[in-house]
């Protein structure tokens, strides 16, 4: 991605629509506007124009907007052409922009230029993609707060507190002849305790944001006819899976995305686990094993009215190809007169009826509790796994600084740990970053953004 070229892309989703947008950014925008529109539109004023090809024939008629840099999203000159949303029309407009000297934008290149031109920090840039990809209203609100800089502001405030503490420690190093013991000052310990507390708060906020963004991969497994597909249909709220009394009905992995109070669940219904001579069913079971190995959590569904299945829970769980946490779901409790017998030591278990819906609310609450998800409030922000990792590493350095300070070790060691903590926090907002990290982040964006 060269920052010196002019880029162009279709900024609206593929398909037909009332309006489609082609976006152009770079120093060549003015020349492209003059060739395509006849003149450069007035700054930040929507103007009606005919968009013309190389022969002067109209391609389309629509709205043109020109945003001179640096007062634009990317920090460069930006031209937006809003035409009719047909794929042929938009393709013709994009081709014309490319003919006039632009090149096709890479995924995320517009937002990357905004980052490189200091219009956004890295956490805000990632929030752009999170807002586009948000799967719930709560996730969208959290992403918008991060895009507006709330997450970055909290990270910056924490980094400033670490910096002030480091300056205090370095003052003690620079003036060892002073009679005052700076490193033994109670105020220094108080500041360090405040920073440790803020780390804990911010880490929890980021963890909730990560759950909102990434959700939980939940694999439903169990013997044939345990009611796995019926349970999926109940959780989804519609008939996502075919349900019959015939064992082996589900032969492939069925994926559904649902949400519980804003927590995204990627639910996978799998083939019943058993030995089968049927090649198709055997392949479905092999795929079930593969998905189980990737699960964040397993719902192991057992037919509560089947005494042999209930007795075999321990052996079935031991045979699962995953170390992921398991929840035993005793299904079909509407068919039994009392509670089924459970051996001591079995994992967490829930009793439900997919047929009547009994116990489903408790199961939903259990799934939220498993990951520590709380209904979103005004303070929840969009965050990613890399943010959590950076916070964890920064927090480790601060804890080591606390240990060294408590043991009255050399101030140089304390200062170095605090410096390393600052660097880790800088990775979140992009103050400290690498080209490889930027490439991985922006490659996940859609083209045109």
Image (tube, rainbow, N blue to C red):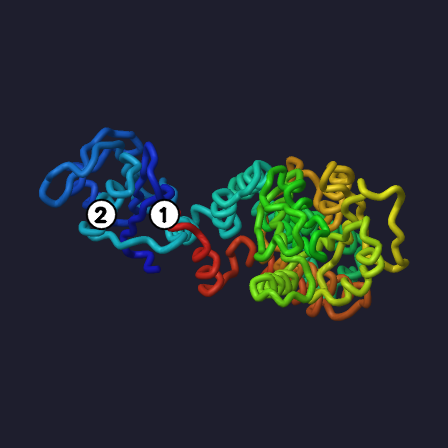
Displayed quadrant of residue 319: bottom right
Numbered badge on residue 192: none
Q: Is residue 182 left or right of residue 99?
A: right
Q: Is residue 336 in view?
A: yes
Residue 186 percent location from the top left of the image = 81, 54
Q: Along the line of sight, which residue is nearer the eye, 41 or 314?
A: 314
Task: Provide the secondary structure element on which disc 2 rests.
Answer: helix
Q: Is residue 28 left or right of residue 256?
A: left
Displayed quadrant of residue 177: bottom right
Q: Along the line of sight, which residue is nearer the eye, 73 or 317?
A: 317
Task: Please report the residue visible at 17 percent of the width from the left and 41 percent of the height from the top.
Answer: 34
Cα–Cα gap, marks 2 and 1: 14 Å
CB under 8 Å between callouts 2 and 1?
no
What crowding class fits label 1: few (fewer than 14 Cα within 10 Å), some (14-19), or many (20 or more)?
many
Q: Is residue 352 left or right of residue 427?
A: right
Task: Please report the residue visible at 49 percent of the width from the left and 62 percent of the height from the top.
Answer: 437
Residue 402 percent location from the top left of the image = 76, 61
Residue 449 percent location from the top left of the image = 39, 47
Q: Along the line of sight, which residue is nearer the eye, 110 or 246?
A: 246
Task: Provide the secondary structure element on which disc 1 rests.
Answer: loop
Task: Please report the residue visible at 58 percent of the width from the left and 65 percent of the height from the top.
Answer: 283
Between discs 2 and 1, the one toward the N terminus: 2
Residue pointed to by mark 2: 97
Residue 91 percent location from the top left of the image = 25, 46
What crowding class fits label 2: few (fewer than 14 Cα within 10 Å), some (14-19), or many (20 or more)?
many
Residue pointed to by mark 1: 448
Residue 369 versus residue 81 in the image, above or below: below
Of the 4 image quadrants, the one containing the N terminus is: bottom left
């Amino acid at each position: 991605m060269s920052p010196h070229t002019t880029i162009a892309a279709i900024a609206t989703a593929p398909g037909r629509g009332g309006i489609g947008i082609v976006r152009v950014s770079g120093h060549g925008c003015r020349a492209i506007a003059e060739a395509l529109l006849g003149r450069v539109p007035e700054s930040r004023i929507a103007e009606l124009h005919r968009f013309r090809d190389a022969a002067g024939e109209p391609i389309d008629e629509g709205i043109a907007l020109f945003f001179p840099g640096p007062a634009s999203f990317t920090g460069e000159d930006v031209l937006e052409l809003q035409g009719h949303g047909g794929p042929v029309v938009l393709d013709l407009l994009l081709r014309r922009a490319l003919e006039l000297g632009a090149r096709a934008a890479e995924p995320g290149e517009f937002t990357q230029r905004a980052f490189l031109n200091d219009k956004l920090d890295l956490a805000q840039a990632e929030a752009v993609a999170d807002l586009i990809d948000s799967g719930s209203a709560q996730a969208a609100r959290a992403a918008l707060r991060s895009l507006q800089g709330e997450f970055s502001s909290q990270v910056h405030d924490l980094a400033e507190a670490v910096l002030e503490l480091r300056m205090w420690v370095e003052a003690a190093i620079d003036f060892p002849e002073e009679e005052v013991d700076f490193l033994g000052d109670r105020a220094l310990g108080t500041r360090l305790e405040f920073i440790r507390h803020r780390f804990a708060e911010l880490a929890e906020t980021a963890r909730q944001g990560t759950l909102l963004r990434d959700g939980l991969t939940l694999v439903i497994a169990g013997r044939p006819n345990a009611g796995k597909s019926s349970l999926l249909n109940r959780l989804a709220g519609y008939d996502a899976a075919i349900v019959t009394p015939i064992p082996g009905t589900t032969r492939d992995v069925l994926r559904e995305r649902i949400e519980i109070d804003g927590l995204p669940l990627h639910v996978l219904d799998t083939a019943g686990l058993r030995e089968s001579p049927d090649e198709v069913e055997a392949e479905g079971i092999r795929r079930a094993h593969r998905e189980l190995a990737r699960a964040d959590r397993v719902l192991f569904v057992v037919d509560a009215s089947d005494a042999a299945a209930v007795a075999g829970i321990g052996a079935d769980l031991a045979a699962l190809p995953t170390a992921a946490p398991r929840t035993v779901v005793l299904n079909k409790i509407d068919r039994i007169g009392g509670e089924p017998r459970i051996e001591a030591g079995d994992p967490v278990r829930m009793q439900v009826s997919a047929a009547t819906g009994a116990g489903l609310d408790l199961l939903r609450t259990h799934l939220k509790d498993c990951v520590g998800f709380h209904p979103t409030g005004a303070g929840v922000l969009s965050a990613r796994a890399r943010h959590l990792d950076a916070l964890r590493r920064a927090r480790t350095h601060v804890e080591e600084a606390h240990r060294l300070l408590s043991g009255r070790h050399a101030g140089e060691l304390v200062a170095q740990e605090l410096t390393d903590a600052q660097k880790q926090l800088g990775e979140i907002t992009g103050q400290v970053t690498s080209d490889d990290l930027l490439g991985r982040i922006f490659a996940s964006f859609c083209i045109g953004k």
